[in-house]
Image (cartoon, rainbow, N blue to C red):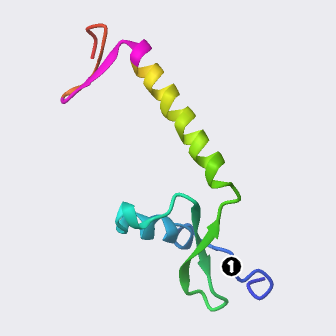
Amino acid sequence: MRFFVAGISWTPYNGAEAGLWAAKQKPESLSSRIKYRSNCTVFGRRYVGEEKLGIEDKDADNLYNQMEELYKQFKKNSGCKMEQNGTHCNGKS
């Protein structure tokens, strides 16, 4: 099977390669327009593959701005505020 589907990750250990790799990188070095995925060679060597997401820059920025606005509205309307020792909503922790 490995010869027909060379990029498949057979085990959870192999499948976690991209997540582990991304966690070790500096956030500013990662692109938000690229999906990082775990791959394996035919011989089982793990590596991280990159796949450009099929979204226009303008659309991505528009979606980000809409999500940011929704988040601001949520924070404003929820009445909850974050404190160092936890979240407090209406006097409850």
Above or below, 8 relative to 56: below
Q: Which residue sits at x=57%, y=68%?
A: 15
Residue 56 at x, y = what percent? 67, 54
Q: Amino acid at mark 1?
A: Gly
Dividing the picture into quadrants, the one containing residue 6 is bottom right
Q: Is residue 16 left or right of residue 40?
A: left
Asked whether 38 falls inside the magenta stretch, the response is no
In percent of width and height, residue 78 lies at 42, 14
Q: Quadrant of residue 45?
A: bottom right
Tell which residue pokes out farthest to the front in this image.
58
In the image, taking residue 5 as reference, residue 69 lies left or right, namely: left
Which of the image's four quarters has the N terminus? bottom right
Residue 60 rendering spot, x and y as whole percentages: 61, 48
Q: Position of residue 46 (x, y in %)?
A: 54, 81
Q: Nearer the viewer, residue 10 or 41?
A: 41
Q: Is residue 75 above or below residue 61?
A: above
Q: Residue furthest bottom?
A: 43
Would you say 3 lies left or right of 56 here? Answer: right
Q: Residue at x 40, y 67 (%)?
A: 29
Residue drawn where x is 52% and y is 26% of the image: 70
Query: Which residues are drawn in magenta?
Result: 76-84
The residue at the point 52 percent across, 57 percent down is 32
Question: Label 1: how many residues lie within 10 Å, few (<14), some (14-19) or many (20+)?
Answer: some
Q: Is residue 14 above or below residue 73?
A: below
Closer-to-camera residue (24/29) = 29
Residue assigned mark 1: 7
User: Residue farthest to the top?
Assistant: 90
